[in-house]
């Protein structure tokens, strides 16, 4: 059922562009992508990569250039795999964001439009009803039996009734319409919303490692120590047997790289700690959010 706009015209296309230029788009903070230099630095500090480099240098030192260049190829191959995996992950995340992108209803040029939430700008007129999340901060203009669940911001367990008075007309991004429907004028978008500010304050808090992270760190250290001891033992045995330090180093490095005792835990730690899922660009607002499993109630005319 379509509801009347009650005389609200909203922005024109030109006004939308001007407002977006002045106040920005309705996007929250996104974790920046890892630069290529940082990816290469992380690869270069992994134990298996260092062992490959050591083996490569030893082959060059003894003049076995065929084996040396084969090791160079292995080093390049490991690096390329890391970079390709990173870009594929970023591409998959971007596709997921596009697929789950929330939408909202706004009034522009006197018509109701269904637009992506990030396209909303300051002073847009947004329309919402029961079960939807508010896509931006705003001031309530019209409402009918309207209440909002603000637990995500305030922790209150009960919905808050909203009115058109100065004390009760403020709406906040990320909160959920518990009942009724309403129309509001957008007052803040993106990082300028209360939800966005809360996200920035949380980002500034230095998080402590979880018990699982501590266990993984301890496991990595133990395996690195075991790998170092194995390297020393194998080096000593081979040196005593062959009398050649270069041959002993090659065998020891190849042994440790083949067993992978030092590298695999490091990879596990890297994968566990590399979670870079970005914040939802629009705080999960819009029509793709929950309706709490209830049929929507339709409401009559809005009150002014």
Image: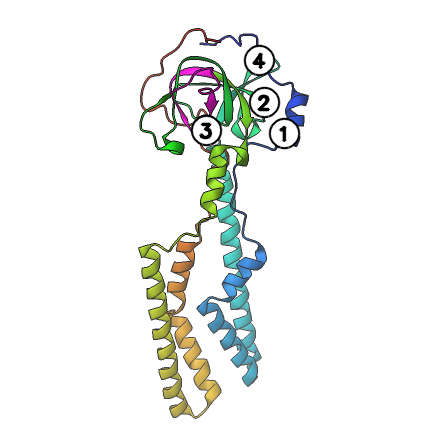
Among the two numbered marks 4 and 1 on one chain, the one whose residue lies closer to the N terminus: 1
Q: Is residue 69 magenta?
A: no
Among the two numbered marks 1 and 2 on one chain, the one whose residue lies closer to the N terminus: 1
The residue drawn where x is 55% and y is 32% is 26
4 vs 1, front mark? 1
Q: If the image is split into quadrants, where does the N terminus sit?
A: top left
Rendered position, 27 above or below 92: above
Residue at the spot of label 2:
123
The residue drawn where x is 36% and y is 87% is 237
Among the two numbered marks 3 and 4 on one chain, the one whose residue lies closer to the N terminus: 4
Rendered position, 17 above or below 265: above
x, y percent for residue 185 = 54, 20
Residue 231 falls in which quadrant of the image?
bottom left
Residue at the spot of label 4:
111
Residue at the spot of label 3:
285
Q: Of 179 and 76, which appears nearest the observer?
A: 179
């Amino acid at each position: 059922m379509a509801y009347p706009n009650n005389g609200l015209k909203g922005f024109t296309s030109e006004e939308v562009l001007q407002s977006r230029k002045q106040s920005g788009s309705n996007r929250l903070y996104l974790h920046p992508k890892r630069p290529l230099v940082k990816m290469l630095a992380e690869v270069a500090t992994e134990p298996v990569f260092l062992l490959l480099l050591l083996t490569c240098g030893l082959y060059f030192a003894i003049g076995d250039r065929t084996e040396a260049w084969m090791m160079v190829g292995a080093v390049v191959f490991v690096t390329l795999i890391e970079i390709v995996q990173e870009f594929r992950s970023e591409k998959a995340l971007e596709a997921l964001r596009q697929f789950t992108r929330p939408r909202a209803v706004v009034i522009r040029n006197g018509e109701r439009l269904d637009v992506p939430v990030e396209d909303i700008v300051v002073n847009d007129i947004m329309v919402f009803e029961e079960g939807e999340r508010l896509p931006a901060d705003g001031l309530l203009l019209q409402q009918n039996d309207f209440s909002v669940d603000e637990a995500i911001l305030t922790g209150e367990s009960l919905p808050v009734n909203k009115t058109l008075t100065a004390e009760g007309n403020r709406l906040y991004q990320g909160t959920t319409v518990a009942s009724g429907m309403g129309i509001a004028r957008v007052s803040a978008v993106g990082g300028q919303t209360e939800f966005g500010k809360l996200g920035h304050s949380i980002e500034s808090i230095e998080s402590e490692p979880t018990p699982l992270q501590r266990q993984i760190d301890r496991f990595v250290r133990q395996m690195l120590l075991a790998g170092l001891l194995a390297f020393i033992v194998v080096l000593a045995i081979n040196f005593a047997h062959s009398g050649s330090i270069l041959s002993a180093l090659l065998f020891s490095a190849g042994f440790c790289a083949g067993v992978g005792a030092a590298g695999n835990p490091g990879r596990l730690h890297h994968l566990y700690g590399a979670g870079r899922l970005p914040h939802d660009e629009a705080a999960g607002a819009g029509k793709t959010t929950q309706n709490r499993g209830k049929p929507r109630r339709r409401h009559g005319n809005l009150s002014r």
